[in-house]
Amino acid sequence: MEEYEGKDLEMKDQGLPMFLSFLCSAGISIINDNLIKTIRRFTDYEKHQTITKINVSVAVKLTFARFLNCSVILLTTNDNVKGWFGGASLAYDASILIAIMAATQPTIYALNIGGRMKKNKIEKLKAKQEAGEDVVMT
């Protein structure tokens, strides 16, 4: 890698590094989404007196975990300070990560996959009930 230090790669040579940067950013985003569930489960074992204290505990843990997952990992993997603004570098990684994280949560919320699955299950059970079968809705 020393032979490329200080030199800009041509656009055709940046395809693989940019693709790998995108994959890493997508991986970080997936981990961030799963952090919410994991931290909620850890907080269930704590003995908080109020819902507010539970939410504060989750928020602090989530902020720290996401900071480590996003910022620190990006900085440690892009240790070449001079190359931070070249193709497939820290600036590119951070931009892709921000774009993915900005689009992921609203998209998941808009798709409402869990709600749609529940609605389909209820409709199937109602159809069975209307057909005269014994159905237990839980």
Image: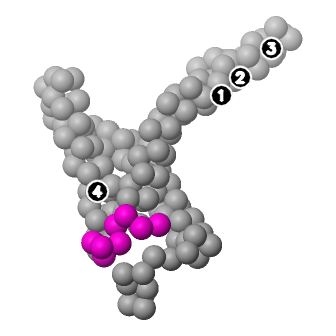
Q: Which residue is mark 1?
A: 117
Disc 3: CA contacts within 10 A as few (<14), some (14-19) or many (>=20): few
What is the x, y in percent for residue 107? Answer: 55, 33
What is the x, y in percent for residue 125? Answer: 73, 18
Q: State which mark lies toward you, 4 or 2.
A: 4
Q: Does residue 93 appear left or right of residue 127 in this picture? A: left
Q: State which mark lies toward you, 4 or 3.
A: 4
Residue 71 among magenta residues: no
Q: CA distance from mark 3 to mark 2?
A: 11 Å
Q: Which residue is mark 2?
A: 120
Q: Which residue is mark 4?
A: 71
Query: Magenta region: which residues?
Result: 80-87
Q: Amino acid at mark 1?
A: Met
What is the x, y in percent for residue 5? Answer: 38, 84
Q: CA distance from mark 1 to mark 2?
A: 5 Å
* Mark 3, secondary structure of its residue: helix
Q: Does residue 63 appear left or right of residue 109 in this picture? A: left
Label pair 3/2, CB-CB below 8 angstroms? no
